[in-house]
Image (cartoon, rainbow, N blue to C red):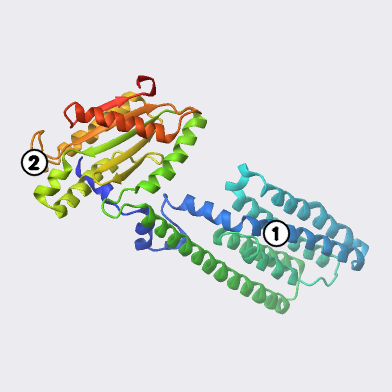
């Protein structure tokens, strides 16, 4: 393993690294940001549904109020905006929250719906201004706080909606001939509402990101083996089961490997447990550096035994990967005078290569890999042996 690979293997878990780097501009690393967005959606999906439903009901109530109180010349275009533009858009946004395939786009959909609401309210006030009807502008302030605190929008789309609506309102009132002193006060209150909303939305998202990061750090600490930094056995089982089910659905092959440091008890007896721990760390770095894809998994299984799962690889490539691991550990040149095979630390590897079937389980693959590992030891150790289900 080269210096670059070794450095990569030594990098801290993503959440710990992000915590050290800080939350700059409400943005995580490329590795964590997609996961945070899924977390954000899980937290706010129900709130977004209720917020859109409440908005639909409120616009219906405002439409009823308009029908009762507005003169005919104003009533018809206002109702057209409320019932023909705003209400259908909000309804479509509400329905989209129930479509799983649209959920990655809900921030865009919700943001677009919120912006149309805001611009629609500006349009309603403009209609009133044209007909010299004294319709209050405070409805825009209500829409502004709706953007920031009820819709579940993140900071950037919420502020884009709020300030775009603010700019549209100023442009509309400037063109409608509203007296300057009135426009100044209206702009001050609406601008202040946006400042409060922007700050509040920023701190809400910042706090949510901190909570996510803390949760992620605890999860990483719970999943990691304290000595090697690889996953522990429990975390491997959970993730490997997910990969197994995905491979079964997508009909992809898996390589499941058991890896065991040769004569490690003798190593500990001769060099001491502290030296043994350091050796296990170096061995783990080599193993982990060969499982960098998202669905590849490596873990310490217990003692000097490691386990790995590689997703959707050919048998030939799987053998190459494991041979590189074996050679990489040999290249560490760690003295092992108590070993019967060359005087340096080495590893034996058993591989189970298979396509998961409905009647198979992950435990079957692990058992097959363990059989292959036993054969590797029988064949002199420091080697890779592969077995397939049909070879049992």
Q: Is residue 100 left or right of residue 382?
A: right
**Residue 145 quadrant:** bottom right
Vertically, is 336 above or below 88? above
| Mark 1–mark 2 distance (CA, rounded to whole Å) | 68 Å
**Which residue is label 2 attached to?**
338
Q: x, y percentage for residue 103?
A: 60, 47
Query: In the image shown, does 81 or 296 lie closer to the viewer?
Result: 296
Q: Is residue 261 left or right of residue 26?
A: left
Closer to the camera in the image, 389 or 178: 389
Q: Residues within 10 Å of mark 2 (few under 14, many from 20)?
A: some
Residue in view at x 39 percent, y 48 percent: 234
x 23%, y 44%: residue: 304
Q: Which mark is residue 387?
A: none
From the image, tell me which residue sits under label 1: 50
**Which quarter of the picture shows residue 129?**
bottom right
**Circle 2: element type:** loop
Classify mark 1: helix, strand or loop: helix
**Residue in view at x 38 percent, y 62 percent:** 19
Q: Position of residue 342 (x, y in %)?
A: 8, 34
Q: Quadrant of residue 64?
A: bottom right
Image quadrant for the N terminus?
top left
In screen coordinates, is 205 left or right of 68?
Answer: left
Please state if 85 lies on the left or on the right of 302 as rendered: right
The location of residue 331, given as percent across then percent down, is 15, 38
Q: Position of residue 15 (x, y in %)?
A: 39, 57
Q: How many marks?
A: 2
């Amino acid at each position: 393993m080269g210096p670059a690979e070794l450095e990569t293997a030594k990098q801290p878990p993503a959440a710990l690294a992000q915590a050290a780097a800080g939350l700059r501009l409400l943005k995580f690393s490329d590795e964590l940001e997609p996961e945070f967005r899924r977390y954000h959606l899980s937290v706010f999906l129900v709130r977004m549904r209720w917020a859109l439903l409440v908005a639909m009901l409120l616009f219906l109530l405002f439409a009823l109020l308009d029908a009762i109180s507005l003169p005919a010349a104003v009533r018809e275009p206002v109702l057209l905006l409320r019932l023909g533009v705003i209400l259908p858009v909000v309804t479509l946004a509400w329905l989209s929250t129930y479509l799983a395939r649209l959920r990655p786009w809900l921030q865009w959909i919700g943001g677009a719906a919120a912006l149309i609401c805001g611009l629609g309210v500006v349009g309603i006030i403009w209609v009133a201004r044209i007909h010299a009807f004294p319709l209050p502008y405070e409805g825009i302030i209500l829409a502004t706080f709706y953007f920031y605190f009820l819709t579940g929008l993140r900071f950037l789309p919420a502020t884009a909606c709020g300030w775009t609506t603010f700019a549209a309102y100023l442009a509309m009132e400037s063109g409608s001939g509203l007296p300057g002193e009135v426009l100044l006060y209206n702009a001050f209150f609406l601008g202040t509402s946006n400042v409060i909303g922007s700050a509040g939305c920023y701190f809400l998202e910042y706090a949510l990101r901190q909570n996510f990061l803390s949760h992620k750090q605890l999860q990483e600490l719970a999943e990691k083996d304290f000595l090697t930094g690889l996953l522990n056995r429990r975390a491997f089982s959970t993730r490997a089961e997910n990969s197994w089910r995905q491979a079964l659905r997508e009909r992809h092959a898996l390589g499941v490997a058991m890896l065991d440091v040769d004569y490690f008890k003798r190593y500990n007896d001769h060099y001491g447990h502290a030296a043994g721990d350091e050796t296990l760390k170096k061995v783990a770095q080599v193993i982990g550096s060969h499982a960098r894809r998202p669905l590849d998994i490596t873990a310490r299984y217990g003692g000097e035994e490691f386990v790995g799962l590689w997703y959707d690889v050919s048998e030939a490539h799987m053998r190459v990967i494991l041979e590189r691991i074996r050679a990489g550990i040999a290249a560490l040149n760690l003295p092992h005078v108590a070993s019967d095979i060359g005087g340096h630390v080495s590893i034996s590897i058993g591989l189970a290569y298979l396509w998961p079937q409905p009647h198979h389980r992950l435990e079957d693959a692990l058992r097959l890999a363990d059989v292959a590992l036993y054969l590797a030891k029988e064949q002199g150790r420091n080697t890779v042996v592969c077995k397939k289900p049909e070879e049992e």
